[in-house]
Amino acid sequence: MLERLRALVQEYVSKQLYESAQFWADKVLTLSDGDPSDLATYGQVLYSRGHYQRAAHILEGSPHLMRSAALRYLTAKCYAASKQWEQVLSILEPQEETQDQGDQQEGPDSIHVPSLGNVESASMLLQGLAHEGLGNIHAAVSSFKASLAADVFCEEALEKLRYLHALSAEEERSLIASLPFRKQCAVEEEQLVRYLYQKKLVHGTQHATPAAGKSAADFGATGDVSRVTQALATNLDVLSSRAEESFRNFDAAACLDLTSHILSHDPYHESALLLHVACCVQVGRADELFSLGHRLVEQFPGSPLSWYAVACYYIVVSRHQLVLKYLTKAISLDPHFVPAHMAFGLAFAAEGEHDQAIAAYSNAARMMQGSHWPLTYLGKEYFLTGATSISNRFMKNACALAPSDPVLLQEIAVVLYHSKEYEKAERYLTRAADCLRSVDPHVTLQAWEPVYSNLGHVHRKLRRYELALECHFKALQLKPDEPSTLTAIAFVHLLRGDYDGAVVYCNKSLCLRREDQFTIAVLQQAVEREGEEALDLGSLEVGTMDEGESSPALYGDGGEGGNATSGLNCCDAAMTVE
């Protein structure tokens, strides 16, 4: 009879009829005189019904608790559901136990619960969640690493490391190399797990799928694994990884295509939703953000992502106070929701509130210890407040984490430009151009336009006018009809003494932006000086350009319409999505 009732409990659990399962699990526990396996089943049923405190109380009252890792794990799981993180750690972390001689001979974990199996990895994961909940990110990262090492299939541990942006590129590679795949996986499984994990990593090597032109040999895989990875090419999680790859490469259009496809099949795919929101901000899709935000709030009011989407809508329509209101709501639901912290910083920075922006980026930096983005933004904010030495320190630390990021290299060049270190600025911008060619060999993405435009400004400062024109024309090719670039070309022509060229490009620029005072000043100079032998441009170069109002210079050099340093904005915080 007892075995029949146990089977009945499992049947009701599988049917999610938890009330009936609880009724019979309670009777089985009494009839078996508190058997640990039956106690575990009863605790799981109570947990499934949301009776966390009741389950924890019953489990803690068992004399078997300290001799069963599985029962301790279940108890800690109940406390975790109630966010009682100190209790979680007190149950799971090693303790000095007073046991009689018989217990010592059996060992502290001598009672095995077959239905739960080995809970070592799950317990380490739970410890990591507890440390994260208490704000101890360093300890949380250590626990997540230990969880993944204990069970390489525990993807949740890897996802937590990824979510926290806890690892640098080198640390990610070291972690994957250290995992005991061969001890825990068959050969085919090892290749598959490596492939999927590399797709998930923030800094992971960007592999194409076999369907995209790679052979099985490129993955070191057998034919069977090749067929599996080819089949997985249409998997939504794999497509989401591809979308994130496109987003990191600033290809918002490709990312939007992929996320739209994913959301057409699964409208609530979380990672795709976050990317989709970020891309919608980048391309200014206010209507789509409005409908998406309201739908998410209606369906998932307890999710920080829902309120973050609403805040992003207000970012696009420039409602600053409402942005702060809804970002605050998102952070109140999850204090470690990094995109909201980054968006907070960007929202304050957009209003010129540098102290608040620095505080927000500092919070993000503490949580994203493996990401260069918070450090980059901190460097930028300190630079704008005049603290150049502090700015340089943050930029240097960011560069140590991402030495080949073209956006970061450009930000460093901007600081050097304003410090009048033009030769160094030119080297960093040239490195940025080389790096972006490795990402986008034909350099076709509009997001790269500021790199070439700013490189043109630096060449102009160094009086390399032919190179300056070459860079500005490349920028114009990437972003046609950009008035700031047209004015920059006109200004270089003026400096070269090509007054006809200056007039032509000033007129083109003024057709797009009629009230720009710097462009008008360049046009007036070109018209007045045309045909003259001598032209004193010193006052124009120093007085107008470097103080410039709406001049086509690097950020801080000009006003509205000037080239942005790198296109950094609040969407870059969702991956980060950085």
Image (cartoon, rainbow, N blue to C red):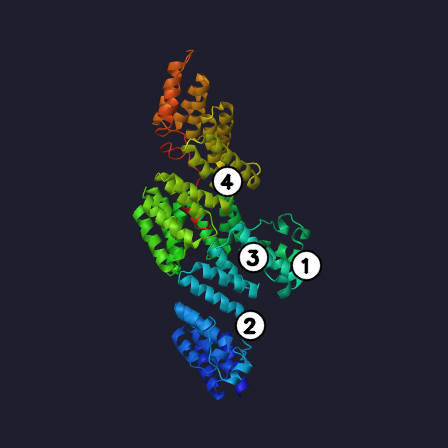
- Badge 1: few (under 14), some or many (20 or more) residues near its Cα, within 10 Å? few
Q: Please name the residue that numbered disc 1 is placed on.
A: 224
**Of marks 2 and 1, the one in the foreground:** 2
Q: Is residue 212 left or right of residue 429?
A: right
Helix, strand or loop at disc 3? helix
Q: Which residue is mark 4?
A: 406
Q: Is residue 219 left or right of residue 426?
A: right
Q: Give the amino acid type for the residue marked by disc 3 in the picture.
A: Leu
Q: Position of residue 97 (x, y in %)?
A: 47, 78
Residue depicted at x 48% and y 55%: 166
Q: Which residue carries the number 2 mark?
A: 118
Marks 1 and 3, Cα distance to the nearest angstrom?
Answer: 26 Å
Q: What is the CA distance from the residue labelled 4 to the residue labelled 3?
A: 26 Å
Residue sitting nearer the eye, 486 or 83 = 83
Type of the residue with mark 2? Asn
Nearest to N terminus: mark 2 or mark 3: 2
Mark earlier in primary sequence (2, 1): 2
Q: Residue at x 36, y 34 (%)?
A: 560
Tell me which label, 4 or 3, sits earlier in the chain. 3
Left or right placement of residue 487 versus residue 195 in this view: left
- Residue bearing the label numbered 3: 175
Q: Marks 2 and 3: which is nearer the front?
A: 3
Q: Residue at horizontal 46%, vertical 43%?
A: 396
Going by the numbered disc 1, the residue's amino acid type is Asp
Q: Is residue 74 visible?
A: yes
Can residue 48 be seen here? The reply is no
- For badge 4, the amino acid type reads Pro
Residue 15 locus on image (x, y percent): 49, 74
